[in-house]
Image (spheres, rainbow, N blue to C red):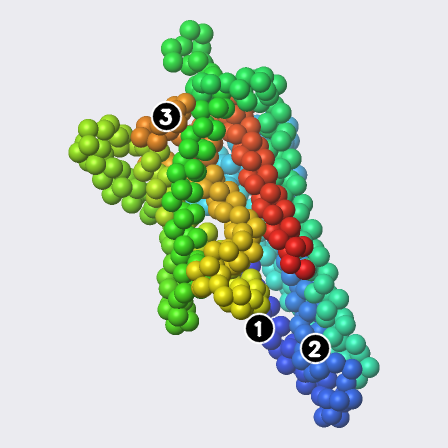
Amino acid sequence: MQPDTLILILLGLSACAYYIGIRRALAVSGGHPRKLHSLPRYYGYFAVLWCALPALLILILWLALDDKVITQLVIAALPEEVRELPEERLNLFFNQVRNALAGVIPPRDPTVQAAAEHYRNLQAISGGCLTALTLVAAIAGAIWARNRIRPDLWARNQVEKILRFFLILSSVLAILTTIGIVLSVLFESLRFFKQVPLPDFLFGLHWSPQIAIRPGQVGSSGAFGFIPLLAGTLLISAIAMLVAVPLGLLAAIYLAEFAHRKVRAATKPLLEVLAGVPTVVYGFFAALVVAPFLHGLGETVALEISFESALGAGLVMGIMIIPFVSSLSDDVIHAVPQNLRDGAYALGATRAEAITQVVIPAALPGIVGGVLLAVSRAIGETMIVVMAAGLSANLTLNPLESVTTITVQIVGLLVGDQEFDSPKTLAAFALGLVLFLITLSLNVLALHVVRKYREEYE
């Protein structure tokens, strides 16, 4: 039985366990729920948890270990001359076995055919055992939970204890995943800095990550200066924020202070739709509409504007970020206590004066925090830059020229067949580490600003 089918059956059994748990609770209380320690539905949840959790645990562990165990059993059954093959050739042999199982390449070697047949039989046995064990665990758990249901059973406490455990487990897994990602990037970056000195990377003014495969190869300078990429990233992000911050902030002020309630209810979701548009669509818009328009405009005023320019990418990226600024700013402005506005009106301030001299200063720390989060979003954007700004690592502050960013170069370094011990490939991890530190600093700064805001008004 396929795992998805097994999960559907478990969902059905859990629904039955929920019904049985409630019926059992009403039965042992004589039809008087007040005699129960918890509400009847908690006895249903109690039965569901004992029905589903042991079965899911078995299913997850089995699926995690199934392939490795079967592989070892198949290896143990192979002829001795095959088992003693080097690891690389043994892996190649198993690739042939898996191709034979998938029907991609018909096996010509009798040994491969026999191993594939053995593998298939073990998979069938494993699937049958998994189905039986999972269903037995689910049914046994539901029966055990049903028999434990009594009026004095603290069902709600036990259900909440199990849910609290899963919440803690989810948080720990998220933290461990983050730590694992950071450590993997850090270790690969250290390998890069063993081959390329850290000062050359941080202060170098030339980026050309091509490594010579043979001596004297032309065009393979292998320069890893980080400054052109940082300059391109900051330039495009600055243009984007020059577009997004004024428009987003003015839109937030209008929605929060001037718009009618019906207008606000209709306009705000429409504005936030911009955040849901895929970035590749923005990239097409930048490459096919904005870039030709800017190029034509430049010709009109005798100004040379490249088809792939930082200006085009930054403008479109700013449009994309407007919902981040407007939505966060709107929430912060709404959080300003109404008594501050009333106090300003009582002192004779007009509406505009109350907004500019009371509401905006009060909401400013929160607005700054939202803007810093939007900057992090702009720094991490890739697709628009690839399609509208190009791949040239030019060290320039001219927005009319082609530049590139850190994220674009990371993608370019990891495309295609690369050796994972060459500086060219490892440079992607070094760039990722620096990008992580930049965005982390911005997020920490934003959190600090927001925390300071909260402390002032508490």
Q: What residue type is labelled 2?
A: Tyr
Question: Could you say where residue 406 lies in the image, as x and y percent from the top left?
Answer: 47, 32
Q: Residue at x 17, y 34 (%)?
A: 300
Picture quarter with the C terminus: bottom right
The structure residue drawn at horizontal position 62% and vertical position 77%, both measured from the top left corner, is 16
First in sequence: mark 1 vs mark 2: 1
- Which image quadrant: the N terminus? bottom right
Image point 42% across, 14% down: which residue? 220
Taking depth in this image into account, of 57 and 245 the one nearest to the observer is: 245
| Tag 3: amino acid | Ser
Of pointers 3 and 2, the one earlier in the residue sequence: 2
Q: Distance between the residues labelled 3 and 1?
A: 57 Å
Q: How many neighbours does mark 3 have within 10 angstroms: few (below 14), some (14-19), or many (20 or more)? A: some
List the residue tagged with mark 2: 42
Circle 1 residue:
12
Q: What element carries label 3?
A: loop
Q: Are marks 3 and 1 in contact (CB under 8 Å)?
A: no
Left or right for 341, reference 350: right
**Identity of the residue furthest to the front in this view:** 348
